[in-house]
Amino acid sequence: MRNLCARVLRKLASIVDPTPHARPIDVSDDYVRWLCYANAGILHRGNLFSFDYAIRNLPSEAPLVEIGSFCGLSTNLLTYYKERHGVRNRLITCDKWEFEGAHHGSMVGDSSISHSEYQTFVRETYIRNIRMFSRYDLPYAIEMLSDDFFEAWRKSEEVLDVIGQPIKFGGPISFFYIDGNHAYEYVKRDFENCHEFLERGGFILFDDSADGSGWEVCQVVAEVKRSREYDVVISNPNYLFKKR
Ligand SMILES: C[S@@+](CC[C@H](N)C(=O)[O-])C[C@H]1O[C@@H](n2cnc3c(N)ncnc32)[C@H](O)[C@@H]1O
């Protein structure tokens, strides 16, 4: 009888609140709060739990790659968790600061700011932010669209990042954070490219992949789940996968 009551109550709770992750775990601390005041960005705080987990459990010393950096908030947080866990794997970020829906020559809304001025401002802000908040462990910030980044990675090219640091591409990757173009075809291609270079036991975190969020990212996540090549390790509410 008590079991039956518990089941009925659970069922009622799920009808009242159908989202399984109404309250994601938020591991923000004082530093995260101060950083978020100063460093503009688009970050779900639940991702921090996944950053922390993945960085504590990296399978090797292979680099971490972030696709989509904007003003550097997630970049600086990845650096923060690296520092906390004494992880020295290189962090490589990839963004060309070309925003969806922004057309060259057009203005931002009804303002007198052009999209190209906005783009330049965000790029410079990114550089300033990493120079401040990741100064002892600067990431390699590659100014490319992700497709071009992977092409160059495949060819083991030698490139300079946005602040002139040389880096030789190629080899396995231990963690990908996918937060670039959110349209299905882009996320799908980003995933396929990541899959090619991700080592066994490595991680992929998809931003904006929460169940019911409506982003096309969710379709890719459903396909990854069906593929049986990955285990879901965290959904908080975005999905963190580990490669089998
Ligand atoms: C949602 S924002 C990233 C937010 C960032 N992670 C943060 O912490 O605030 C998406 C970013 O992806 C970049 N982007 C869009 N399409 C891309 C692509 N194909 N390759 C790489 N970056 C891309 C955009 O320029 C933009 O800065």
Image (cartoon, rainbow, N blue to C red):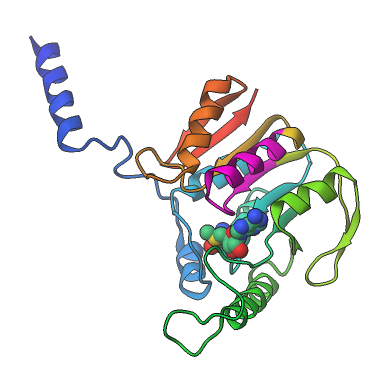
Ligand 1, by image quadrant, is bottom right
Name the residue located 67 percent from the left edge and 61 percent from the top edge.
95
- Quadrant where the image shows the N terminus: top left
Name the residue located 69 percent from the left edge and 34 percent from the top edge.
195
Inspect this view and state whether residue 148 appears: yes
From the viewer's perspective, tell me whether residue 107 is left or right of residue 64. Answer: left
Name the residue located 20 percent from the left edge and 31 percent from the top edge.
14
Magenta stretch? 175-195
Q: Nearer the viewer, residue 74 or 218?
A: 218
Q: Is residue 192 magenta?
A: yes
From the viewer's perspective, tell me whether residue 35 is left or right of residue 84. Answer: left
Quarter of the image where one finds residue 109: bottom left
Quarter of the image where one finds residue 28: bottom left
Q: Tell me residue 187's x, y (percent).
A: 58, 44
Farthest residue, direction top? 1
Farthest residue, direction bottom? 112
Q: Tell me residue 164's x, y (percent).
A: 85, 71
Inspect this view and state whether residue 74 appears: no
150 up-or-down from 231: above or below: below
Q: Tell me residue 123's x, y (percent).
A: 66, 74
210 up-or-down from 222: above or below: below
Q: Tell me residue 99's x, y (percent).
A: 57, 66
